[in-house]
Image: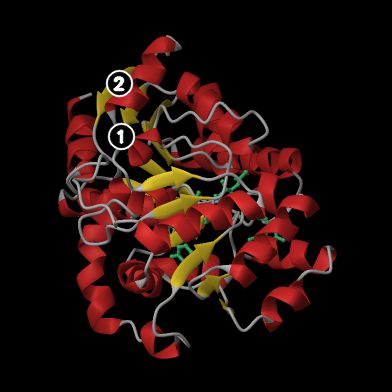
């Protein structure tokens, strides 16, 4: 039996295509949700939008400090794996849920399969960088999305077997864009004719008052008005640093609550360009049915392939640098159009094929 572990929004989206493949082949699996993300807009909306089965186990770990959250997930995942005795545990990405899932399984002698293995930002301020490195070294099966990711794993001499598979987020994007175009009414709610899509939630950005205040300036002065579905961590930090009023009152900014996948795909499809510190959105911007320039509001990226392909540009976090780069693009930039470096939309098929062979 395979245990599929998820905990946050991007894990649900990126595990979706894996779950569909497991269902299609009638393989024995269960779905374990730590509920690191628990609000409807960060969790159950994605089960509904993607048509995923309800989780078999919901562990209610919720929010907390890094150690608390990871520790709580470790304790509860270990109990769950002892009860259901999986042969393989699958985790996806780099969250605290992922590290806890990998560690709990490895300590029980259960093989770990890491989907999206081998990404490296080399920025040790990021909890995600610790999580992904440690998970890679705990895993028996490493599903690297690209050759760059495979190279990172080889350089570190990981123990497990490595395959290059593409990223399942392209599978999700290709599968759901048409449904999004048919079902989502989000564009009726957008207040601007032309807009740029914004997301920002990274801990090392939004928990830092200087960076957060630069972000507010960027969004208020962006040369194309901004539509911003806002993550609860960011709302909390904007309120803590007394910046929420300035952002929400700006005529250049439309704030939305976090939105479901179909609505988000529709906004990605229709925007002029994207400003984000998200990981997954850098990948989705390269999908053949999205193809958007994406300005990465960070000082590093673990997705250098998107930069190489001309989609992503790492612009840092200072208001001046970001606004200069965006203005240059608006004046004379071209939206990229090359193939996605993250695969052909068949990553999940490949991964589940490989799992059948091991
Ligand atoms: C987590 C992941 C990050 C991923 C992101 C996806 C880690 C270390 N971070 O960051 O890699 O990019 O998810 O969105 O695992 N909150 C709510 N409702 C919820 C969940 C969270 O209000 O359902 C608020 C709480 O105030 C919480 C804060 O958001 O303290 C941060 O949540 P948490 O899960 O710790 O980290 P994210 O910033 O969401
Ligand atoms: N996303 C969404 N609604 C939103 C914001 C993002 O559906 O309001 C999707 C987005 O399409 C991508 C994923 O969530 O697939 C990215 O999640 P996030 O940026 O929170 O995490 P990261 O990828 O940085 O870990």
Q: Quadrant of residue 2?
A: top left
> How would you rate the neighbour count of disc 1 (Cα within 10 Å): few for under 14, some for 14-19, many for 20 or more?
many
Location of residue 55 in the rendering, given as x and y in whole percent from the top left corner: 44, 59
Task: Classify mark 1: helix, strand or loop.
Answer: loop
Judged by depth in the image, the label closer to the viewer, 1 or 2, is 1
Q: Which residue appears at 18% of the width and 45% of the height? A: 339
Location of residue 230 in the rendering, given as x and y in whole percent from the top left corner: 59, 69
| Residue that label 1 marks | 145
Q: From the viewer's perspective, is residue 238 above or below residue 25?
A: below
Q: Is residue 338 left or right of residue 249?
A: left
Q: From the viewer's perspective, is residue 317 above or below residue 173?
A: above
Location of residue 216 in the rendering, given as x and y in whole percent from the top left corner: 68, 65
Q: Nearer the viewer, residue 202 or 24?
A: 202
Q: Quadrant of the C terminus?
A: top left
Q: Which residue appears at 21% of the width and 50% of the height? A: 21
Q: From the viewer's perspective, is residue 92 above or below residue 248?
A: above
Q: Taking the image as drawn, is residue 109 in sight?
A: no
Q: Are marks 1 and 2 in contact (CB under 8 Å)?
A: no
| Residue that label 2 marks | 162
The residues bearing labels 1 and 2 have C-alpha atoms spaced at a distance of 10 Å
Location of residue 215 in the rendering, given as x and y in whole percent from the top left corner: 66, 59
């Amino acid at each position: 039996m395979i245990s599929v572990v998820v905990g946050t929004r991007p894990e649900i989206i990126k595990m979706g295509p894996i779950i569909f493949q497991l269902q299609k082949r009638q393989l024995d699996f269960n779905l374990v949700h730590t509920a690191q993300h628990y609000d409807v807009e960060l969790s159950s909306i994605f089960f509904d939008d993607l048509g995923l089965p309800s989780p078999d186990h919901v562990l209610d770990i919720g929010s907390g400090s890094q150690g608390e959250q990871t520790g709580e997930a470790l304790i509860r995942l270990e109990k769950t794996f002892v009860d259901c005795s999986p042969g393989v545990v699958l985790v996806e990405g780099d969250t605290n849920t992922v590290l806890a899932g990998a560690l709990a399984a490895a300590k029980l002698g259960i093989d770990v399969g890491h989907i999206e293995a081998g990404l490296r930002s080399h920025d040790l301020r990021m909890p995600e960088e610790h999580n992904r490195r440690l998970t890679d070294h705990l895993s028996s099966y490493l599903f690297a999305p690209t050759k760059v990711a495979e190279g990172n794993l080889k350089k570190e001499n990981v123990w497990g077997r490595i395959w290059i598979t593409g990223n399942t987020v392209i599978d999700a994007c290709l599968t759901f864009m048409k449904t999004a175009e048919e079902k989502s009414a989000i564009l009726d709610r957008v207040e601007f004719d032309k807009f740029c899509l914004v997301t920002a939630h990274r801990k090392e950005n939004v928990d830092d008052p200087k960076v957060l205040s630069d972000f507010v300036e960027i969004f208020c002065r962006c040369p194309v008005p901004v539509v911003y579905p806002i993550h609860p961590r960011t709302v909390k930090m904007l309120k803590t640093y007394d910046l929420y009023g300035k952002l929400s009152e700006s005529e250049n900014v439309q704030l939305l609550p976090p939105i479901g996948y179909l609505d988000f795909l529709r906004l990605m499809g229709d925007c002029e360009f994207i400003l984000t510190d998200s990981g997954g959105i850098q990948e989705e911007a390269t999908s053949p049915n999205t193809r958007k320039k994406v300005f990465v509001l960070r000082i590093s990226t673990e997705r250098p392939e998107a930069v190489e392909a001309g989609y992503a540009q790492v612009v840092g976090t200072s208001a001046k640098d970001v606004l200069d780069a965006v203005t240059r693009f608006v004046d004379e930039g071209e939206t990229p159009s090359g193939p996605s470096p993250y695969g052909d939309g068949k990553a999940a098929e490949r991964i589940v094929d490989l799992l059948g062979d091991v």
